[in-house]
Amino acid sequence: MKEISRPRRAAALLAAAVTITAFCAADTLARSYPFGPRTRSVNDLGNQYVPFHAHLWDLLHGRADGGLLVNWQSGYGSSFLPDLGTYLGSPFALLVALFPRDEIDLAVYVVTALKTAAAAAAMACLLLTLRSGRWWAAGLLGTSYALCGWSVADASYNPMWLDGLIALPLLCLVGEWALAGRRRYLGVLVVALAWAANFYTAYMATLGAALVLLLRLLLADLPRRRALAAAGRAALTVVLGMGLAAPLVTVVYFGTEHAYPGRVREFVPVGSEDLLARLLPATYGFASPALYVGITALLLALALPFHRAVPVRVRTGWTLLVLLVTLSLQWAPTHLVWHAFATPQGSPYRQAFVLCGLLVIAAWQALAYGLPDRRALTAAAGLLALIALVASSSHVVRFFAWPVVLLATAGALGGLALLGRAGAGRRNRLTVLAVVLLLGAQIGETAATSAVATRMRLAHMDDYAPWGQRQSRQAAAVSEADGWPRYRTDPGREQTVGNDPMLVGGQGAQYYSSLTSDVLSRTLTALGGGWTSRGRNLQSLDNAVTDAIFSVGARVHSPPDPHQNWFPQDGSGVTVSRQEVPPLVTVRPSGSAAHAGLSAFGPSPYRNQELLLGTRVYTVPRLTVRTSAGRVPSRSDDDRPGLRIGALPAATAVRRPTITARCPAGSEVYLWAPHLSGTARLTGAPAQGPTGRFRSDHPVTKIASMQRLGTVPASGRLRIELSPDKTSMVPDGAVGCLDTARLHSAVERLRATGATRVTVSDGTIRAELPSGSRGTAVVAAPRIAGWRCAAGDAPAAPAGEYHGLIAVPLDGSATSLTCTFHPPGLRLGTAVGGASLLVLAVLATFTAVRRRRAPAPSTTTPPRERVATAL
């Protein structure tokens, strides 16, 4: 056993070391964080994953608002277990607790690097399990897999996907154990960890491992009974492992059922030239499959069909499997199967890592049976040249890719040629030189490929600065103003990332997740809120009425993030504004419907805010809108309602589009223009108001939030100048003038009749109510699925809904209110997990009893060796 484990251990260590070296070398070459000034926080890495890991850090250190059930910092109260299962289920995520809080970006980087290294080590062990061979070759091919194109181009900034990269070779090992009838319980644990870490990519890895096991069974040519027994053992292992992971998997599943619907996309396969181009180093394309595994691994895989030392059944089987999986990437029905029957909203080739793994395994088959001869390598080089020729017409191949391709090919062919001259099994200078050449070529081309992907992502995606002075000032301001749960502290409208409350603290509307609830998104949109990512990235709404509704008593105001360079900077610092607000639990008078849903909302966000507040506080005047030429604008001809305003030319225009109206003097002016992109400014007022900054897009992936522009002058006539940077819309009823005195009176009434004391602990809210409270108790939190409430000593029942918020009817007898949250699917998942544990216990007992009663085994060849010999 020690002789077998030693090569695997050496191969795993080599694979991990080379992977870490190439991983860091790539970021050094790209001058990317933490080895250079360029940020690596692009797209969802900065918006989602770093903030979620920061929230995990707070949870592990006892500093978060909320717990495992409810995240009270985001979206005015969101279910956290589905997010935990989606983004933070990996055991590697716990390592962030070892880093300082202000080094959260470095913590995520280290976790990403370690996950990649673990995938390399797992693949190296798998290769030596499939067939014995040179340990250093298994190590290099393990690196080829871990730093494949999918890993460096897609998963490096979606670190939870890397758990699938680790899962594939581990699940293949589970298949090998099932084939040999060994390590049943360890196999169940591996499956459970894989599915709990990230069930999305674990699903794809399970499909890939099942294909590998099926091929192994076919190649072993076992009797039908033994083959079915091995397949049954594998299936039972997977089912029991998935059962153990069910408490997380089910809450994620039901969380997606209640999430705001995303974009529905039709799958369109890429052209053959793009498909083949992504096999080459230093290529990049967001919507094409990143299949790069290194020139050495690719040459060996291409040589497999021509390698005469490999049994015909083996080379035919692995070659056909690679080809069939490649075709499955391009066919819509199998594409849906790979993605759990839902086309992704982003990159449509998220299963590409499975094909990368199969290419590496095919390369190992070509090498483990002996180095391919000159004929096989010549054929492989010819196929590689043909791939390069076809790929030359692809737009994903840029000029700088060809020197990398040529150098990598020369290094790979040179290293393989030296190995051939050195002779099999001989340790001499030629062997050492060959290994050094292959290693250098692999590190060089992989570092170049990763660096290209890093630079190209920065050029085509939104990016965000790592933790710095801005975030430190925001966090300090939030901490000083925090009064939770007496009131909320919103980290501010001028956000740094899409999940500022998790990153810098506070309790706001901001929330970005694939599981953003439908009720939250629709409620905030009806109130004038803005969002990106088609409704799943909700933004803060800086509005006095909504602050009163959601008990936001302190609000941080920051200048626009200079890293984004979206708008001119005003040079102001971080400030905090405060206002008196009602408590988290208020009592609405009798007649308020405890089950009034979102359908009661109308088209005007001002009237919708009044509906939730319970008082008329806005004047919504008739508007006069003019273009920069002074003409009446035309009506929209698409799905964005309103009057069309054209973009201003690059040079500053003398006249700008305007909105004019009349409102009561002294009222606050708000502009609601969800499909305006640019700035808006109130002119003619005695005191200059703030400049409203709006960002929208079409097709509608972003809408702008309502914004305050200033105060109505004494004349009562207001004039708003618009500076659109693209064609925009001004909707009917865009302007609302807030009577602050009426708002103050409404707040005082809600404070007088609201809860006298509120406590919040993870998934429980308790409120003490004034004696004789009648009507409807309204909790300033979205009525997401899972809330149950009880007034006084009454039994708990599913919470009612008051225009999207939690509501409970009161009959005047109760002086307390208790609401508890149970994530949908948790009970079901716990039951399934318990059943799986019970089955495991029964199996373990039965096995132990059978072994005790069985006679001593005779000295024969172990089952695993018989299977290996057959293969």
Image (cartoon, grey):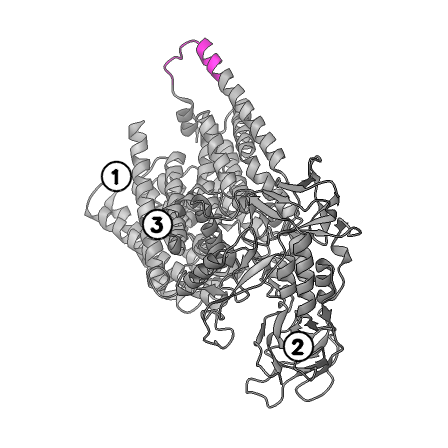
The answer to which of marks 2 and 3 sits earlier in the sequence is 3
Q: Which residue is label 1 attached to? A: 425
Q: Which residue is drawn at 74% across and 80% down?
A: 634
Secondary structure under tag 2 reads loop
Q: How crowded is mark 3: few (under 14 residues within 10 Å), some or many (20 or more)?
A: many
Secondary structure under tag 1 reads loop
Q: In this view, does 840 lie to the left or right of 429?
A: right
Q: Which residue is label 2 attached to? A: 666
Q: Looking at the picture, tell me which residue is in the foreground, 50 or 468.
A: 468
Q: How far apart are marks 2 and 3 (CA)?
A: 64 Å
Q: Which residue is label 3 attached to? A: 19
Asked whether the viewer can see residue 263, the reply is no
Name the amino acid, label 3: Thr
Asked whether the viewer can see residue 766, the reply is yes
Image quadrant where residue 448 sits: bottom left
Q: Residue 717, labelled with which disc? A: none
Q: Quadrant of the C terminus?
A: top left
Q: Which stretch appears magenta?
A: 847-860
Of badges 1 and 3, the one in the foreground is: 3
Of badges 1 and 2, the one in the foreground is: 2
Q: Distance between the residues labelled 1 and 2?
A: 89 Å
Secondary structure under tag 3 reads helix
Q: In which quarter of the image is the N terminus?
A: top left
Q: How crowded is mark 1: few (under 14 residues within 10 Å), some or many (20 or more)?
A: few
Is residue 764 within the magenta segment?
no
Q: Looking at the picture, tell me which residue is in the foreground, 280 or 662.
A: 662
